[in-house]
């Protein structure tokens, strides 16, 4: 399997990731927030964005997996 080069994140993408992070965090209930950190959600979002994902719904789904 070929390793794909990461896609650079421009300012627009960074802003989308920040917005999706907030959406992801507040979509979790208090019990789920107690078992997962924003750092984990951020890592998932950044990995997805680095692979080239820009669709908000797919980014959100990736963060919540």
Image (spheres, rainbow, N blue to C red):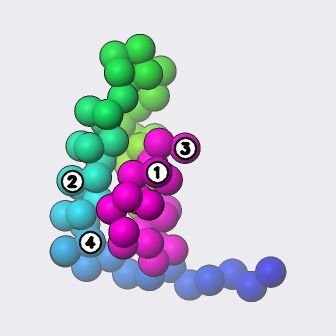
Residue 7, percent across and down? 44, 81
Q: Which residue is mark 3?
A: 65
In the rendered image, which residue does mark 2 sit on? Answer: 19
Q: CA distance from mark 1 to mark 2?
A: 14 Å
Q: Secondary structure at mark 3?
A: loop
Question: Residue at point 19% right, 74% down?
Answer: 12
Pointer 3 or 4: first along the chain:
4
Residue 45 visible (yes or no): yes
Mark 3 touches mark 1? (CB < 8 Å): yes
Alpha carbons under labels 3 and 4: distance apart:
20 Å
> Who comes first in sequence, dot 2 or dot 4?
4
Residue at x 33% of width, y 62% of height: 56
Q: Residue furthest right?
A: 1
Q: Confirm or deny contact between disc 2 and disc 4 (CB under 8 A).
A: no
- First in residue order: circle 1 vs circle 4: 4
Mark 3 crowd level (few <14, some 14–19, many ≥20, 10 Å Cα): few
Q: Are marks 1 and 4 in contact (CB under 8 Å)?
A: no
Classify 36 as above or below 45.
Answer: above
Q: Which residue is mark 4?
A: 13
**Magenta region, residue range:** 47-65
Q: CA distance from mark 1 to mark 4?
A: 16 Å
Please determine whether, in this image, residue 48 is positioned above or below residue 64: below
Vertical position of residue 15 compared to residue 2: above or below: above
Q: CA distance from mark 3 to mark 2?
A: 17 Å
Q: Which residue is mark 1?
A: 61
Q: Secondary structure at mark 4?
A: helix
Q: CA distance from mark 3 to mark 1?
A: 6 Å
Disc number lying in front (1 or 2): 1
Give the residue furthest to the front: 57
């Amino acid at each position: 399997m070929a390793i794909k080069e990461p896609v650079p994140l421009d300012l627009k993408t960074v802003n989308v990731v920040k917005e999706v992070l907030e959406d992801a965090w507040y979509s979790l209930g208090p019990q789920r927030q107690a078992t997962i950190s924003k750092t984990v959600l951020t890592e998932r979002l950044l990995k997805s964005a680095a692979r080239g994902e820009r669709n908000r719904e797919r980014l959100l789904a990736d963060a919540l997996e």
